Image (cartoon, grey):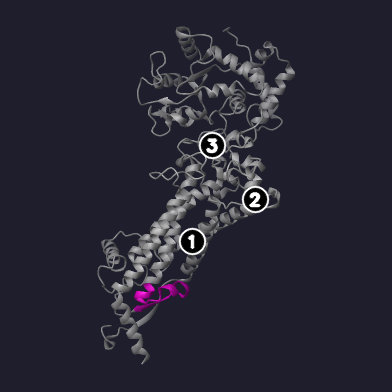
Amino acid sequence: MKNSAKKPVISERYVWELPVRFYHWINALCIVVLCVTGYLIGRPPAIQSASEASFSYWFGTVRFIHFIAAFVFFFNFVYRTYWGFVGNKYARWYNFIPYKKSQWKEILCVLKVDILQITNKRFSTVGHNNLAAFTYFLTFLAFAFQSLTGFGLYAAMSNSFFPQLFAWIIPILGGDFMARQIHHILMWFFILFAMVHVYLVFYHDYIERTGVTSSMIGGWKFVEDDKEDTK
Amino acid sequence: MSTKKPTIYEEVRAAGYSRRDFLKFCGTMAAMLGLEASGVAQVAKALETNSRIPVLWMHFQECTCCSESFIRSSHPIVADILLDKISLDYSETLMAAAGHQAEKSLRDTMEKYHGKYLMLVEGSIPTGNEGYCCIGGRSAESIAKEVAAGAKAIVAWGNCASAGCVQAADPNPTGAKPIHKVITGKPIINVQGCPPIAEVMAGVIVHLLTFDRIPQLDGLGRPKAFYSRRVHDTCYRRPNYDAGLFVQSFDDENARRGYCLYKMGCRGPNTYNSCGVIKWNNGVSFPIQSGHPCIGCSEANFWDNGPFYQHLQSFPGFGIEDTADKIGVGLGVVTGVGIAAHAISTNIRKHKQIVEGQEESNDENI
């Protein structure tokens, strides 16, 4: 890269399988819908209206959309968890939990190179880098807790068996109020995550030029062939 | 007391009620317990054949609003029979006996009906200091444990006994604890509310008399017959909620129209109680009907759950007005600024890398 004569050979690699891509975009759509409807439910706009309640049901509809999106979100998440055990090496569960020393080293490296920008080492990974993967692991925990509190609250409004599976979380938290409070605070985690996530994807594409943005659509990434493919 | 105790029905008749009144009471109670039509006969039969269960009504750290609520039960038989006779055993507020006599009456009942009496508890139990709520020279905790040891079942009246209520609110100076955190190994029914609705209290007692077993309870130990639905679900203002019509302030036009009080901090959506159905003071009204948001008095920690008139709780560690939303927006701005700073830094620090890439691309194009 120092000059054109030493240019590395760039090849393409299939990184994100179709189920992973589907998961990602369904998840993204669900989170957007859930955050928008959730915010509206938590803080409905002021409407001055002289009409009778029987003529309108918009708030009920917003809640209905929230509940439907929640079901899609949850089962999509369950599916992704399953894929973490059967998918390719970039999708497997062990990417997300830093249990090896080398993973922690890479986290430190990413922090230095990409976030704090102390050094200018050329650095990129084929799949998720370890810091990103660990952040996704934390979001998975947030997904799980958001599902627990959400369906726990929903259980009181439903007779079907599924939400009742989550009803146990309410007494642990001491009541609906606390569950609702946690559910609301976690919404902000999702919003902040989305901001940073989208920015960092653009950043990586800009600096590393591996086609990371489009890789979540087509599945292919550009990889320098001299790079040792450990991940 | 005589060797053969009169049945509840006999006591009712002796108090001057007709059989018709008695059956009306049975019908009311069966309906409130959510029993089917045949349940009326079951209630009547139970009250005709069973003698009243000996009851010890213990008062600890409380304000007596549970007792006040109970004696205002809509059906006079409740007060006359269930309560008048209860006072014969032990109830600090209502018994005639005092001092050593009262203590003797308590002791007699505990010995004579060991394992058979009901313990009704009003108030939380202080654990911070033996001196708090000291009755007859003994701490509330030791009295509670002694009485509970021989009780068939324990009914925790109100939020104090069920969850600690205001005494257990932060900073909880007396170390107040609800009864279920002090006593273990006994069935405990949490009859929540501050106070509970009189008919709910009567309903729980009648259930215990009729079926001789504790009613079905929810995850927080509350009888499902009365606490399975949120105030929100039975609220007559619910259609306004679904239509997105909310009161914005107490003096606005929407308040006059009787719109939903959700944005005024109504705890109805988080509170399980029968206020919307049974209502208060013989079914006259309930807070929301009177234009005030529910404060969630049948839920644990309702005093600590943020300002009553604010829909969201204040965020712990921040100012009283700071909700999660305000802090979330603040963090969003900080994140945005951080992103912008990072983007600028990237263009400076990684300038070489970016330029190299462009040059490579130019080389290829040549």
Relative height, residue B163 to residue B362 (above, below): above
Q: Chain of mark 3?
A: B
Residue B196: name its quadrant. Answer: top right
B96 displayed left or right of A132: right
Q: Is residue B15 toward the left or the right of residue A170 in the image?
A: right
User: Alpha-carbon neighbours of circle 3 within 10 Å: few (<14), some, or many (≥20)?
Assistant: many
Residue A128 falls in which quadrant of the image?
bottom left
Q: Nearer the viewer, mark 1 or mark 3?
A: 3
Q: Which residue has dot 3 on it?
A: B295
Q: Which residue is mark 1?
A: A79
Amino acid found under the numbered disc labelled 1? Tyr
Q: CA distance from mark 1 to mark 3?
A: 41 Å
Give the magenta part as a residue range: A204-223
Element type where label 2 sits in the image: loop
Residues under numbered marks 1 and 2 in contact, where contact means CB atoms less than 8 Å apart: no
Q: Position of residue A140 (x, y in %)?
A: 42, 57
* Viewer-side residue, B263 vs B241: B263
From the image, which quarter does the C terminus of chain B lie in?
bottom left
CA gap between label 1 and label 2 equals: 35 Å
Q: Quick one: quadrant of the N terminus of chain B?
A: top right
The majority secondary structure of the magenta stretch comes to: helix
Q: Is residue B189 magenta?
A: no
Q: Earlier in the sequence, mark 3 or mark 2?
A: 2
Determine the CA span between mark 3 and mark 2: 22 Å
Check residue A221 for magenta coloring: yes
Residue shown at the point (58%, 35%) measured from the top left:
B273
**Residue at the disc numbered 2:** B243
Label 2 chain ID:
B
Amino acid type of the residue tagged 3 in the rendering: Ile
